[in-house]
Amino acid sequence: MTASSVPAKRRDATRTRQLLLEAARHRFASNGYAATTVRDIADDAGVNVALISRYFSSKEGLFEACLTSADHDVRRAAGSTTITEVAERIAEQAVGFESDGFPRQLILLLRSSGDARADEIRLGILRTFGEKLARLAGWEEGDDALLLRAQMIIAASLGIAMVRSKSGLEPLASATKDDLVDPLTDLIGAVLKPS
């Protein structure tokens, strides 16, 4: 059999793209945007670094794709959540969906890239989540007080995810979803109570 008759190993573009997204989400959430290199991401994914340019055009494009992916993951988790289910959805996100329990979707929303478009997407996601939560509590356009309260819940949720993942502060760091639901329910009820 000659070299030309050996079938070329076919690249699974979808799988490669997913591997890059997973590796990038892990690196960006763990190390931050500035400290993460495309070489690190490619090595973690087990692929050639040139594939980042092929599938995402740049590090910024990959970060933007990670944010978009995190947005879809969080929206899928939230689904058609009611106000009484919000604490459970936040607890699920805070303990993380990754096999290691690291809440990458939430942590990624805290990371600034320095790229205006990626940061615009990140802020848009946070704004949308705040508005959705405020609507669940009865918010209407122009009610800045209720929107502020909803954004405070989002900020607290991000803080919970960050402290759990970075500090080792016990018992928060090892709390399960079930451990978090009741205190989050109390927090949400207290902050979003009608004025």
Image (tube, rainbow, N blue to C red):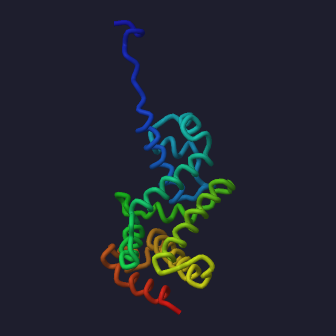
At 50% from the left and 75% from the top, the residue drawn is 135
User: Where in the figure is residue 94, as x and y percent of width and height?
Assistant: 42, 70
At 53% from the left and 61% from the top, the residue drawn is 108
Quadrant housing residue 53 = top right
- Note whether 135 is above or below 13 in the view shown: below
User: Where in the figure is residue 119, as x and y percent of width and height?
Assistant: 64, 59
Which residue, as the protein is rendered here, is positioned at the far bottom?
195
At 46% from the left and 71% from the top, the residue drawn is 161
Which residue, as the protein is rendered here, is positioned at the far top?
2
- Note whether 52 is above or below 84 in the view shown: above
At 52% from the left and 52% from the top, the residue drawn is 66
Observer-nearest of 66 and 79: 79
Q: Is residue 33 left or right of residue 163?
A: right
- Note whether 83 is above or below 7 in the view shown: below
User: Where in the figure is residue 1, as x and y percent of width and height?
Assistant: 33, 7
- Note whether 143 is above or below 67 in the view shown: below
Quadrant housing residue 54 = top right
Quadrant housing residue 73 = bottom left
Q: Is residue 23 left or right of residue 140?
A: left
Counting every numbered tag in the picture gives 0
User: Where in the figure is residue 129, as x and y percent of width and height?
Assistant: 51, 69
Q: Is residue 12 left or right of residue 148?
A: left
